[in-house]
Image (cartoon, rainbow, N blue to C red):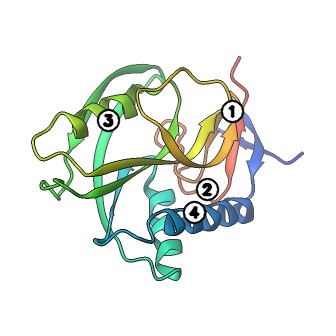
Amino acid sequence: MVNKEFNGDSYKLIYSAEEVNSAVKALAKKIVKDFRHVQTPPTLLIVLNGAMYFGSDLSKALGELNFIHHIDTIKLKRYKEDGHGGSVELLSRPESIDLENKDIIVVEDIADNGDTLNWLNNFLSLREGTPRSVKYALLCLRRRHPTYHFKVHYHCFTVGNDWLVGYGFDSEGLCREWPEIWGKQVT
């Protein structure tokens, strides 16, 4: 088992950079297959900050498959500086204010208890000019998770309860740039 030390904590390797890259490319193929008959390019709505690496790599993988799409971002925050969850805050809206009759693929790093994506699902469905469709693409899905108010259409990995770091996941705002996904056992 490969371990890494950071900031006094020990992390175990969960997924290598090669495994992450392979999973993202496989997910891109599924999306292309599902959207092959769509007339207008869908929009990848990337949830910042956690999904920025995943969203960027997914967009590039889709591009390698000649899948034309728009990219937009939304910035939401639920975790406080102490690592505990709070209420969801909208920090920045999508640039594409007009989402009416558009196919949206929400790109997120993980759905822990689903609060952030439940909030986003309500935000997208209760606004004027609702999208034609909303699908959710997650990098990681918790093995044990509550019932969400949305359907997870795509995910790369199923994970346990480890606190994840790397490839967009952070430890107190740091380590998002690690190309692998590491886990710190939650006690």
Which residue is under mark 1? 8
Q: Amino acid at mark 4?
A: Lys
Q: Amino acid at mark 2?
A: Trp
Residue 128: percent from left, percent from top: 9, 41
* Crowdedness near tag 3: few (<14), some (14–19) or many (≥20) residues, C-alpha within 10 Å: some
Disc marking residue 30: 4
Q: Is residue 142 above or below residue 181?
A: above
Labels 3 and 2 touching (C-beta < 8 A): no
Which residue is under mark 2? 178
Q: Earlier in the sequence, mark 3 or mark 2?
A: 3
Q: Earlier in the sequence, mark 2 or mark 4?
A: 4
* Crowdedness near tag 4: few (<14), some (14–19) or many (≥20) residues, C-alpha within 10 Å: some
What distance separates the C-alpha of mark 2 from that of mark 1?
17 Å
Which residue is under mark 3? 121
* Crowdedness near tag 2: few (<14), some (14–19) or many (≥20) residues, C-alpha within 10 Å: some
Residue 15: percent from left, percent from top: 74, 51
Q: Amino acid at mark 1?
A: Gly
Which numbered mark, 1 or 3, is in the foreground of this view?
A: 3
